[in-house]
Image (tube, rainbow, N blue to C red):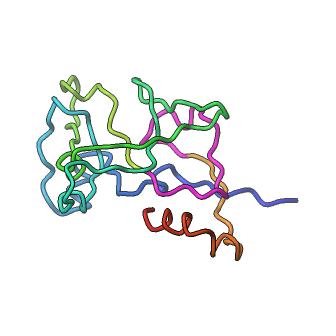
């Protein structure tokens, strides 16, 4: 009998902390949450190093591709699609969390997806299903990472340089 694979929440794959509410942000950071800007999409995470960037834009290699209603878009293999996310450094360095109130203008648009950590080939993404319906709120099932073989550890110069960017 084989053991069941552990379940990891989707948030465990995020590159940065994800804050569900303004209160969560204030509790986690100890600073006041910036006011919600209805002209921008909601964004519940921030990249603290983006403000120090010398570039105008910041690119993140892996972000979940979502439809207008916030559901994950499946690829040809049935697993959620990942794509590059590019943001202006000012936007990447701040959150835009709507207040906990009804009918807040701008809060009904899909949120900016949180970048994910580099995917490991030994991890299998689940099929895009109801558990992936909301980018920031649900859990997914992933296989735990395995130890790298000696070939994976050495790799080519190209693969080593790509690892440095992750």
Q: Is residue 94 left or right of residue 137?
A: left
What is the chief secondary structure element of the magenta stretch? loop
Q: In the image, which residues are magenta?
A: 116-139
Which quarter of the figure has residue 153? bottom right
Q: Residue at x 27, y 45 (%)?
A: 21
**In x, y percent, where is residue 53?**
21, 60
**In x, y percent, where is residue 69?**
41, 24
Is 119 situated above or below 132? below
Q: Residue at x 67, y 58 (%)?
A: 122
The quadrant the C terminus occupies is bottom left
Instruction: Tell me if residue 153 is in the magenta stretch.
Output: no
Is 124 situated above or below 113? below
Is 127 situated above or below 152? above
Q: Residue at x 23, y 41 (%)?
A: 97
Q: Residue at x 38, y 50 (%)?
A: 60
Q: Is residue 70 left or right of residue 28?
A: right
The one of 125 and 81 positioned closer to us in this rendering: 81
The one of 39 and 2 positioned closer to us in this rendering: 39
Instruction: Tell me if residue 120 is in the magenta stretch.
Output: yes
**In x, y percent, where is residue 140?**
58, 46
């Amino acid at each position: 009998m084989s053991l069941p694979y552990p379940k990891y929440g989707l948030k465990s794959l995020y590159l940065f902390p994800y804050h569900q509410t303004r209160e969560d942000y204030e509790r986690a950071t100890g600073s006041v949450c910036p006011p919600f800007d209805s002209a921008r999409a909601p964004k519940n995470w921030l990249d603290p190093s983006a403000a120090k960037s010398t570039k105008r834009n910041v690119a993140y290699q892996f972000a979940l591709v979502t439809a207008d209603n916030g559901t994950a878009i499946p690829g040809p293999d049935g697993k959620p699609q990942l794509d590059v996310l590019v943001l202006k450094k000012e936007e990447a360095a701040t959150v835009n969390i709507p207040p906990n109130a009804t009918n807040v203008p701008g809060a009904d648009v899909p949120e900016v997806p949180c970048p994910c950590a580099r995917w490991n080939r030994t991890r299998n993404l689940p099929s895009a299903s109801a558990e992936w319906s909301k980018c920031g709120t649900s859990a997914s099932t992933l296989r735990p990472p395995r130890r790298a073989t000696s070939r994976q550890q050495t790799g080519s110069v190209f693969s080593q340089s790509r690892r440095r960017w992750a």
